Amino acid sequence: MAKRTALLLAIVAISSGRMSTAATPANGEWIIVVGGVSLHQWEQYKAQPHDHWWANFVHAARIRTEQLRGQLGPDARITWLVYKPGYVDRGKQDGQDLVANINSVRDRYNLRLVYFSHGSEVIDYLNNGEPRAQVKIAGFEYFGHSNRACFMFDYSNVVDSSSKAWLHENDLAKIDRHAFAKGAFVKSWGCHTGEEMSKHWHAATGVRMWGALGKTQFMDEELPILVSDGGKWVN
């Protein structure tokens, strides 16, 4: 009985080690990109307006970060890339210093926080944010507005129902495919990206990206959910 128990514990330990290694290789980095939220001036007359709450995407990213801290440990490299202009503009609308609020999340969860203003800066960070020969990307996740072909960082922030800052599927070829660790986890939590963009991501990087068929809805106390009939996560 003792031998059987010891063998079982050894198998569990080996399995746990494999899962841990696959999730976060030595010196790996987990990157979370947070897009900007819309403004009331563009959304107030819509039947289904977006982003009633300024922290629509920030809160979801925070929930996910809590999960990762529990899984990867307090010292794992987790980096947030946040579209700053969206929160500066929304802060003026709401009469709050939203950048300071986001900084407080950094302080609480021991994150590296990098603000960006253009989609090209996201690609630059993926390629060069760390010495990628030593620090590979173990995970990449996106929280924000999106469509089937594009991460839209400022949807309805500058122009009604449009975006002037984005990462389009045609830009993905600029990503260095060697930046990612073997078995890296990639997921877009936005709408529709599983319909087209996920295929372009895989072709460009060699890494599969989970994305939604249909719309997703950002929640208060849980990660985004699928809300379209027949919606599902695909990669």
Image (spheres, rainbow, N blue to C red):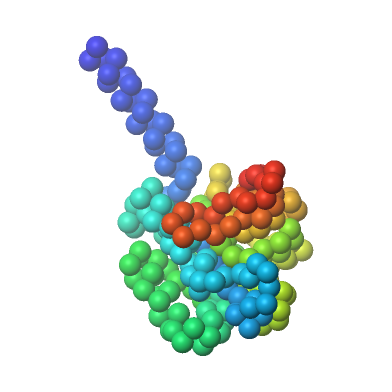
The residue under the point 39% across, 70% down is 106
Q: Position of residue 154 (x, y in %)?
A: 63, 75
Which residue is drawn at the image coordinates 53% and 85% (left, top)?
Answer: 93
Give the quadrant of the N terminus: top left
x and y, in percent, of residue 11 in the image = 37, 25
Residue sitting at 55 percent across and 48 percent down?
184
The residue shown at (70%, 55%) is: 192
Nearest the camera: 123 or 105? 105
| Left or right, 211 with reference to 82 | right
Foreground residue among 33 and 60: 60
Q: Hey, which residue is sitting farthest top in the picture?
A: 1
Q: 33 or 130: which is nearer to us?
A: 33
Side of 113 relative to 216 (left or right): left
- Across and down, in percent, residue 75 comes to 34, 58
- Which image quadrant for residue 5? top left
Q: Is residue 31 visible?
A: no
Q: Is residue 102 left or right of residue 187?
A: left
Which residue of the protein is positioned furthest toward the left in this rendering? Answer: 2
Total tally of numbered discs in the picture: 0
The reply to whether residue 222 is visible in this rendering is yes
